[in-house]
Amino acid sequence: MEDIPTIKAIFGALALVLTFALFYIYIRSILRDEVRPHVFSWMIWAAGTVIVFFAQLSDGAGIGAWPIGISGVITFLVAALALTRSADKSIVPMDWVFLVLALSALPLWFATSNPLLAVLVLTIVDLLGFGPSVRKSWSLPYEENAQFFALGAVRNGFVVIALENYSWTTVLFPAAVGIACFLFVAVIVMRRQVVHRPATSSQNG
């Protein structure tokens, strides 16, 4: 059993490396105009992920929480890039519904001293964040990077393995978001079988 902390440290390090590598590739794709992230999704993910990080720390998640915290900070950068550089401009009323639902749930974090309830609410918020991106990718599947989300799901698997304390509070968020990432990739791949790649698209993901 002495090797367990070492194994968790290894998977925690792998999750951190994947976090930096994935976001480096994704941000580079934005700067090259290869992907056009939906700004609403990234705003929701940034706010929720950082708060979940603190809730996980309060329940003893240890090293397994740090990839979540770091990705939350970097997600704010992606949201800023999405807003100022290459954001998707095709925002529809349904996107506002997802944003309002997500943001209205965030204050519940401050209204409860129960970390599990807070993580449950914030997990729902994060899943709602997929709404605008799924809606957009249904029509424009080449404007998202499928590999980013596929590897992001693997990263979340490493996060779960690296957790120093297993409870619903620590496991729920990375597990649920990992599954959501895989489902989002499935939507992108499925729609690419139906929607032809635009002649001007440089998307390679």
Image (tube, grey):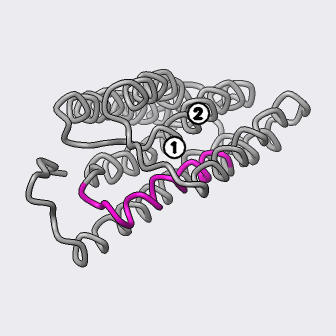
When the figure is inspected, residue 107 is found, relative to residue 156, above or below; the finding is above
State the SS at label 1: helix
At 44% from the left and 34% from the top, the residue drawn is 3
x then y, percent, for residue 137 = 37, 60
Residue 191 location in percent, x, y? 30, 72
Q: Is residue 44 left or right of residue 73?
A: right
Q: Give the label on residue 49, or none.
A: 2
Q: Which residues are magenta?
A: 125-142
Q: Magenta stretch: residue 128 in it?
A: yes
The part of the image, by quadrant, that contains residue 22 is top left
Kindly report the secondary structure that dominates the magenta region of the rendered protein. helix
Spatial CA distance of label 1 from label 2 is 12 Å
Front tag of 1 and 2: 1
Q: Secondary structure at mark 2?
A: helix
Q: Which mark is residue 41?
A: 1
Residue at image coords 45%, 60%: 134
**In the figure, 112 relative to 127: above or below?**
above
Q: Give the x, y percent position of residue 40.
A: 53, 41
Query: For this rendering, which residue is in front, 102 or 100?
Result: 100
Density class for disc 2 (Cα within 10 Å; few <14, some 14-19, many ≥20) is many
Amino acid type shown at disc 1: Ser
Query: Where is residue 204 drawn, in percent x and y?
Result: 13, 50
